[in-house]
Image: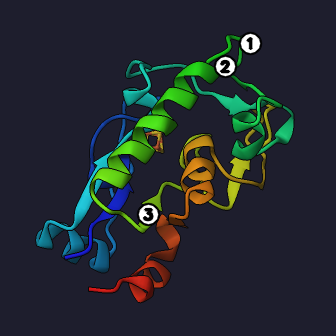
Amino acid sequence: MERILVSACLMGRRVRYDGGAKTSDDAVFAAWRAEGRLVPFCPEVEGGLPVPRPPAEIEGGAGGAAVLAGAARVLTPDGHDVTAHFLEGARQCLAVARSFGVRIAVLKEGSPSCGVLRVYDGTFRGRKLPGEGVTAALLVANGIEVFGEDRIAEAAARLSG
Ligand code: SF4
């Protein structure tokens, strides 16, 4: 049975910056969960950040690829640099994905780690731009297909068994 990497907050784990979860109520997601197909992972917590923690955004409206390239940092509203935690979490996530032979990931859209198509613009004003989070970028760079939690049907169509 093919395994699917998922953002831990979508599984109901209270790992978000505000101490909450973003539990998915998608029926396909629930079926995958019942099958034992899901591999939950929170890159920010595994990268060493606490719960709760200050929000963080990628500076300058850049995406995760720029962070991986050393061209942008991940900052909290008071300017604290948490880039190293985000990079460590992304590396650990890739290692876990590889250990399970994962080809597909379903990630929390909009997150500076897990966002797939959208991330916040770095101003902490609630504005999003096209772009991906740090972990999503590393997974994609290593051949893993990533889908936001609003695209589970597309992810399901890619499953091989
Ligand atoms: Fe969820 Fe990813 Fe944020 Fe962790 S880093 S709380 S898994 S969106």
Note whether 105 is above or below 127 in the view shown: below
The kind of residue tagged 1 is Gly
Please tell me which of labels 1 and 3 falls first in the chain: 1
Q: CA distance from mark 3 to mark 2?
A: 25 Å
Left or right: 4, with 30 as reference point = right
Give the class, few, some or many, for how many residues have Cα within 10 Å of label 3's Cα (few <14, many ≥20).
many
Q: Position of residue 66 (x, y in %)?
A: 78, 40
Question: Which secondary structure lies at badge 2?
Answer: loop
Q: Secondary structure at mark 1?
A: loop
Q: CA distance from mark 2 to mark 1?
A: 5 Å
Quadrant of res 157:
bottom left
**Number of disc labels:** 3
Question: Where is residue 93 shown, x and y percent of the image?
Answer: 41, 43
Q: Which residue corresponds to mark 3? A: 106
Residue designated by label 2: 76
Earlier-in-chain disc, 3 versus 2: 2
Q: Secondary structure at mark 3?
A: strand
Q: Is mark 2 within 8 Å of ligand 1?
A: no
| Disc 1: which residue | 79
Quarter of the rendered structure image containing ligand 1? top left
Task: Nearest to the eye among marks 3 and 2: give it.
Answer: 3
Tag 2 and tag 1, C-beta contact below 8 Å: yes
Q: Residues within 10 Å of mark 1 (few under 14, many from 20)?
A: few
Q: Amino acid at mark 3?
A: Val
Label 1 near ligand 1 (CB < 8 Å): no
| Vertical comparison of 147 with 129: above or below | below
Please name the residue shown 47% across and 57% down the image: 107
- Disc 2 crowd rating (10 Å Cα; few below 14, some 14-19, many 20+) is some
From the viewer's side, name the closer residue of 151 and 135. Answer: 135
